[in-house]
Image: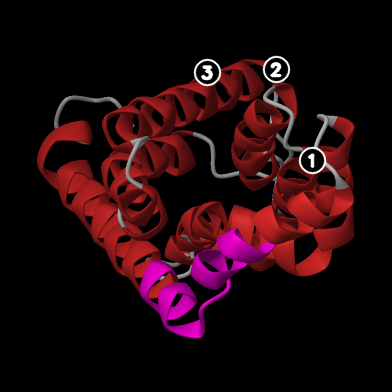
Amino acid sequence: MKEKVLGLKEFVIVLLLACVETAIAIVVAMPFAANLQLVYFLVPGLAGLINGIIYVLLIKKCPKIGTQFIIPMIYGLYFLFTGSVYVFAFFAILAVVNELIMLGGGYRSKIRPAIPHALTWMLNSMGSTLTMLLFRDSLVQSYVAMGMDAASADAAIASLEGFWLAPQNIAIALVAAAALSIAGYALGMKMLGKHFKPAGVV
């Protein structure tokens, strides 16, 4: 069966719920903002856990082409507006990847929809890591533009790399984000049968 594209009403629903997901992620991060370890290891997965309920509601109401593109794009725009251009680019790429994952009847599967949800929050945990890995020189130049000399800027980035690029830290962050996001999706699916469907929400 050929997938249909979002209509105007559905587009608005997806847009609003994607904004809700983004707002929840921002609120979740606020209490942990001063703790680098928790921001890296816990916050993305916790956001994925809570947003799993919103995500399931969203894909059940609008299981069409465009839904998976909008979700990471809205979150990516938040990073763009806060000055993280590279992280926005990562989410823009993920938006296309997530759409491709769901083509060919993905919404009729109980398992496949969990993949885009997990990837979104796994990428969230890797934003700083990928930026440092791929665009280190640009980060150094941004520090120089703020008034630091080149040597100090390089040293500042080097001190951060020890944390963000440590293989064990990357593994912990990815596993935590994936596990909690999948748990959030499972919780959303459970609530779908117990609450959303009986209430006529979907």
Q: Which region is colored magenta?
A: 158-173
For the point 28% across and 49% down, which residue is it? 49
Q: Dot 2: few (<14), some (14–19), or many (≥20) neighbours within 10 Å? A: few
Q: Dot 1: few (<14), some (14–19), or many (≥20) neighbours within 10 Å? A: some
The amino acid beneath tag 1 is Tyr
**Element assignment for label 3:** helix
Look at mark 3 in the image and give the residue it sits on: 16
Tell me, yes or no, whether the highlighted magenta stretch contains residue 171. yes
Disc number lying in front (1 or 2): 1
Look at mark 2 in the image and give the residue it sits on: 8
Residue 108 x, y percent position in the rendering: 48, 61
In this view, 146 is above or below 171: above
**Element assignment for label 2:** helix
**Mark 2 vs mark 3: which is more N-terminal?**
2
Q: Is residue 1 visible?
A: no
In this view, 80 is above or below 39: above
Name the quarter where the N terminus is drawn.
bottom right
**Mark 1 vs mark 3: which is more N-terminal?**
3
Q: Is residue 162 visible?
A: yes
Residue 80 x, y percent position in the rendering: 74, 30
In this view, 8 is above or below 44: above
The amino acid beneath tag 3 is Leu
Tell me, yes or no, whether the highlighted magenta stretch contains residue 170. yes
The residue lying toward the viewer, choosing from 17 and 202, is 17
Which disc, if any, is residue 93?
A: none
Name the quarter where the C terminus is drawn.
top left
Quarter of the view holding residue 131: bottom right
Residue 41 x, y percent position in the rendering: 35, 60
For the point 49% across and 67% down, which residue is it? 163
Look at mark 1 in the image and give the residue it sits on: 143
Q: Residue furthest bottom?
A: 167
